[in-house]
Image (tube, rainbow, N blue to C red):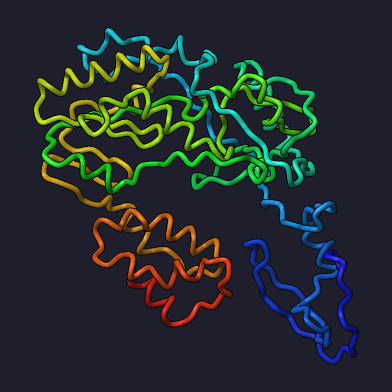
Amino acid sequence: MLNGSNPKQGKIWKKATLTFSFDDCIMTHDFLISPIGTHSAILGIKWLEQESPEIDWSTRQLSLPIASPKVATIAQEEEADDSPLAGIPEQYHVYAKVFGEEEFNKLPPHRHYDIGIKLTDKGPLNSPLYSMTDAESVTLKEWLEAELKAGKIRPSKSSISSPVMFVPKKDGSRRLVVDYRRLNNRTKKNVYPLPRPDDLMSKLQGAKIFTKLDLRWGYNNVRVKEGDEWKTAFRTKYGLFESLVMTFGLTNAPAAFQYFMNDLFQDLLDVYVIIYLDDILIFSKDKAEHEFHVHEVLQRLEGAQLFCKGSKCEFHRTRVEYLGIIVSDKGFSLDTLKIQAVQEWPVPTTVKQVQSFLGFANFLRRFVANFSHLARPLHNLVKKETAWKWAEKEQAAFEGLK
């Protein structure tokens, strides 16, 4: 056995075809029925040949590679606007640099907000290289060339590394990410809090006019602390590289970015600005004071060398979507598309699927009476010590939230 155990041997007395879930993949295979002791089932050589799982022999764990299309299309990197000031009110053109194309591809400077990575003593740091299709390999090579040209990554001689892989997006494209799970397990956690969305929304009472700003680069606006770049190293079939900017997947990235934003706008928070990671909302009671507020925020962004994508920003609106909630001068309402998504959500069959549903449906908390009480059976189901059992109370909770 992969885990080193020896199954009980017994006489084979029947054959059955079973459909089951492994690593969130549904599959159907033939099984031979025999008493094998405490083991529920044994997946043998035929299964290994048919499914070709990734096997990490150092930890004796296996996982299934993500199914790949014949043609791999990577999720589009953010591109500069053709007309950066199009749609930007004229009074804010003085901040053209904030929206300008020429600033977009410059590597951000080192600041005291740089993310450091402090490691604990126990646990492995290296992971095996994941296999890729020919199409994915071509896309990977193009991505590496673009990131090297932009200066976001560089060749590495690190003694540790994490693998890269493609993960699917809803639009059918695939995002290339670094699998930092082992590094994250060894990283000392930054417990700086993210704001509660309901707390943020409570600050908007009485506001009549809104401006929403969309920051370019997201986490990439933060540099990796000088001297810690080697810890971000990732291995590919084309070599070993390390990141110079904070990337999606690092365990402390959300906390580090939220601290950056909160510190930059500390005296404006909850006065006329709320921020959740890279989503900035400016709110005011009238147009005159709102223009002053927007000027102040744009001035600080320019000073901090942070840039916005003008085509995704919204200025001087009486109605705007923020964190999945429609905010207006009349109050709050739900995004109809999100409501529809919850209503059409399929019944979960794994703990991961329950976690995904709870994470997505959390935006309903403000609008559903007794949300916590309704969701309790589902929250109980995802606890580590709880065995999987989808029964009447779990189904009732699921339907109740829908």
Furthest residue toward front = 121
Say left or right for 39 vs 152: right
| Residue ID at (62%, 37%) | 176
Q: Quadrant of residue 288?
A: top left
Residue 45 coordinates in the image, percent (x, y): 87, 67
- The answer to whether any part of residue 44 appears in the image is yes
Say left or right for 219 vs 81: right
Above or below: residue 52 compared with residue 268 = below
- The answer to whether any part of residue 71 appears in the image is no
Locate the C terminus by quadrant: bottom left
| Residue ID at (27%, 41%) | 321
Front residue of this view, candidates 103 and 294: 294
Above or below: residue 392 compared with residue 164 = below
Residue 289 coordinates in the image, percent (x, y): 12, 22
Say left or right for 81 vs 295: right
Front residue of this view, candidates 191 and 114: 191
How many numbered tags mark residues here?
0
Q: Quadrant of residue 251?
A: top right
| Residue ID at (44%, 69%) | 378
Locate the N terminus by quadrant: bottom right
Above or below: residue 391 compared with residue 45 = below
Q: Quadrant of residue 16?
A: bottom right
Residue 180 coordinates in the image, percent (x, y): 65, 41
Front residue of this view, candidates 315 and 386: 386
